[in-house]
Image (cartoon, grey):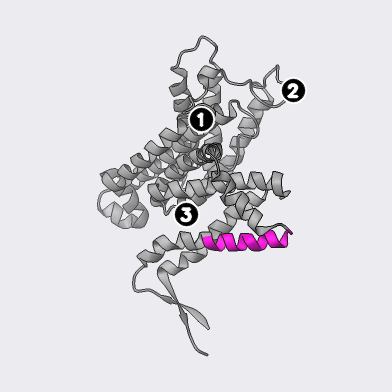
Amino acid sequence: MLRLEARPQPSKLWGYASPLLALAITVLIGIALFEVLGKDPVRGLQVFFWEPIKSTYALSELLVKATPLLIIALGLAVCFRSNVWNIGAEGQYIIGAVFAGGVALTADKGTGLWIVPAVILAGMLGGMLWAGITALLRDRFNANEILVSLMLVYVAVQVLNYLVYGPWKDPAGYNFPQTKTFERVAQMPRLMDGSRVNIGLLFALLGVAGVWLFLFRTVSGYAQTVGGLAPMASRYAGFSSRKALWVALLTSGGAAGMAGAFEVAGPIGQLTPYVPAGYGFAAIIVAFVGRLHPVGIVFSAVLMSMFYIGGELAQSRLGLPKSITGVFQGLLLFSLLACDTLIAYRVRWKKG
């Protein structure tokens, strides 16, 4: 029979191989799922893994989806490495979009280009404010940040709905719950003609370099990591756990809010009830599949965006439900959790 045997020390090989094995298991389970649903597995895999990269336009749409996932996951990586469990990045993303949308709505045809950085900054501040509520309650009252940040997601959704169904509703929008379309000057500049990819991609790539430098080349980043791995050693070294908490949550909240700004003033172009797209929750998977490392997160963000696009195509071309995207995301996460066991344990065959 098979049994698990503890390793003398964690396996570096499986630290890198575990996500690859998890992806392979996800694909195999996906094949079985397509069979059960009566769909051609080859066609199903083609929709998820080939269609999103088969043309220049498809690649550009892949980058559009990957950008918010990458930005949010980078902020969450800082949080999780600090042992601060921010599960509410979706709410911070929504409030960031609301703040950014509020600034964008002030623009008119005579507004200057200063409005673009103002929209981005407003999104960041919105996300930081929403994450700051969690930080305050954890700091002052020792509230559980998992529950607080998660519950604030639903509050953020209601704030958005109140605005788009109420005071910010477009009077010329045929009674649809949405704001007016933002003026062109308030929308994110695109990087190329014929593509929806905007400057958010550049900020995301700069964020990869910035987070890498912060985590691995600065004393503050070292303090965050040590505080997460060994809180008592961190305090002994003179690092402030309160500072680490605030830095972690404000960084992740600001990143999520920035992603909301790029999304609402980019591909969407207005505030609607459909701004919540699940990016904040999916970015948790992205962060862990990428091993909480900025470079690894780049690859996992691209993979997760393939699941998003593949899920949309599966609805229209295979007649599968919208939930198929969440199924693949969940399969990847649980496969990763299972495969991570191999980092600390060996699988042995025991007779009898």
Which residues make up the magenta segment? Answer: 24-38
Where residue 159 sits: x, y (%)? 61, 31
Q: Amino acid at mark 2?
A: Asn
Q: Amino acid at mark 1?
A: Ala
Q: Amino acid at mark 3?
A: Val
Q: Nearer the viewer, residue 320 or 167?
A: 320
Whole-number angstrom distance, CA of label 1 to CA of label 3: 25 Å
Whole-number angstrom distance, CA of label 2 to CA of label 3: 42 Å
Depth-wise, is mark 1 or mark 3 nearer the camera? 3
Mark 1 and mark 3 in contact? Answer it, CB < 8 Å. Answer: no
Q: Is residue 61 above or below residue 334?
A: above
Dot 2: element: loop
Q: Is residue 351 above or below residue 81?
A: below
Q: Which residue is mark 1?
A: 261
Magenta segment includes 32:
yes
Q: Which residue is mark 3?
A: 289
Q: Is residue 132 visible?
A: yes
Where residue 334 sits: x, y (%)? 55, 60
Quarter holding residue 7: bottom left
Dot 1: element: helix
Whole-number angstrom distance, CA of label 2 to CA of label 1: 24 Å
Where residue 169 sits: x, y (%)? 67, 22
User: How many neighbours does mark 3 have within 10 angstroms: few (below 14), some (14-19), or many (20 or more)?
Assistant: many
Earlier-in-chain disc, 1 versus 3: 1
Mark 2 and mark 1 in contact? Answer it, CB < 8 Å. Answer: no
Which SS does the magenta portion mostly show?
Answer: helix
Q: Which residue is mark 2?
A: 175
User: How many neighbours does mark 1 have within 10 angstroms: few (below 14), some (14-19), or many (20 or more)?
Assistant: many
Dot 3: element: helix
Depth-wise, is mark 2 or mark 3 nearer the camera? 3
Earlier-in-chain disc, 2 versus 1: 2
